[in-house]
Amino acid sequence: MDVDAFVLANRPTWDRLDQLVKKRRQLTGAEVDELVDLYQRVSTHLSMVRSASSDAVLVGRLSGLVARARSVITGAHAPLWRELVRFWTVSFPVVAYRAWRWWLGAAVGFFIVVVLIAVWVASNPDVQAAFGTPSEIEQLVNNDFASYYSEHPAGAFALQVWLNNAWVALQCIGFSILLGIPIPYVLFQNAANLGMIGGLMFEAGKGDVFLGLLTPHGLIELTAVFLAAGVGMRLGWSVVSPGDRPRGQVLAEQGRAVIAVAVGLVAVFLIAGVIEAFVTPSPLPTFARIAIGVTAELAFLAYVFHFGGKAARAGETGDVDNAPDVVPTS
């Protein structure tokens, strides 16, 4: 398609639609009919330009014009409750679902590091000595690890945990602007800390205490961290390998989808924080506390794969409805 000729032939149509959009409050009945007709025609023009041209300015201009015309035709935005329902049943779960290979890979790598470091620490007295004196290590494994979950008021502790986890996830998502390269290091730091403590606990015969206190909240908490890391690395990789679409279009789509994950994880980390503050240190039997954690984890995974899979099969990407693929620049 000759883009210049296409623009020359259709510019009057676009200008007329722009005029009608600007005077939307004074439209006559005939002008409303004309607006609808022009909106349909320009939407077709936009599809043609997207498939035949990589002109970011032209695509951005038509995207914005179509979006503004649609808002005039449809009137008010959808009710807030409908937007919220769509977010929790489409936008958030479909992005998580589409990135499942990335966060599964993050989880596998994380636990490999945890196990290797735990075995290394547990089997090397010299490594254990680097953590402190025998009395300090005994204090850690017999008292400090367990008391950490109950030494602060539950409400304040839940808030502290929530903020800490949100910070780790924010780092993972934020580092996507650096192509996701620092994200494995963030995961490694957390895996190393967990592995070192686990090694000390198992070597002291406190492996049951370690797993009994970590599992209730750790399952869903770590899953959320892996999800944040996965979508962050996926966004970074979209810059390196955008496929057969313009890099800016892919980056914009993936970037908006990552924002949906960031918002959704706020709620997931809140659940993890509540479990860690109120369930982990509770007097419930260990099997009951673990059962609560496993239930929360299975519920989250079922939610992601049910709603996310359904939305993915329907062609959803988690992107904002009718958002322009690129931002026009001068």
Image: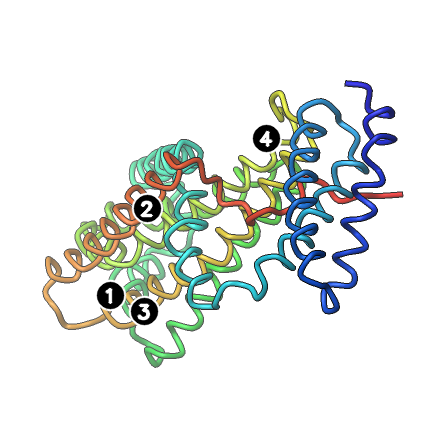
Q: At label 4, which amino acid type do we have?
A: Trp
Question: What kind of residue is marked 2?
Answer: Phe
Q: Is residue 319 left or right of residue 10?
A: left
Residue labelled with disc 2: 307
**Residues under labels 4 and 1: Cα distance?**
37 Å
Residue 29: percent from left, percent from top = 67, 61
Q: Position of residue 63 (x, y in %)?
A: 70, 43
**Mark 4 vs mark 1: which is more N-terminal?**
4
Would you call the spot at circle 1 few (<14 residues within 10 Å), some (14-19), or many (20 or more)?
many
Query: What amino acid is at disc 3?
Result: Val
The Cα atoms of the two marked residues, 4 and 2, are separated by 25 Å
Q: Can you identify the residue that label 1 sits on?
A: 280
Q: In which quarter of the image is the C terminus?
A: top right
Q: Out of 60 and 183, give the one closest to the viewer.
A: 60
Q: Tag 4: Cα neighbours inside 10 Å, few (<14), some, or many (≥20)?
A: some
**Residue at mark 4:** 237
- Residue 274's disc is 3
Distance between mark 3 and mark 2 Cα atoms: 24 Å
Mark 3 → mark 1, Cα distance in angstroms: 9 Å
Q: Where is residue 32 in the image (x, y as percent from the top left)?
A: 67, 57
Task: Please tell me which of labels 2 and 1 falls first in the chain.
Answer: 1
Foreground label between 3 and 2: 2
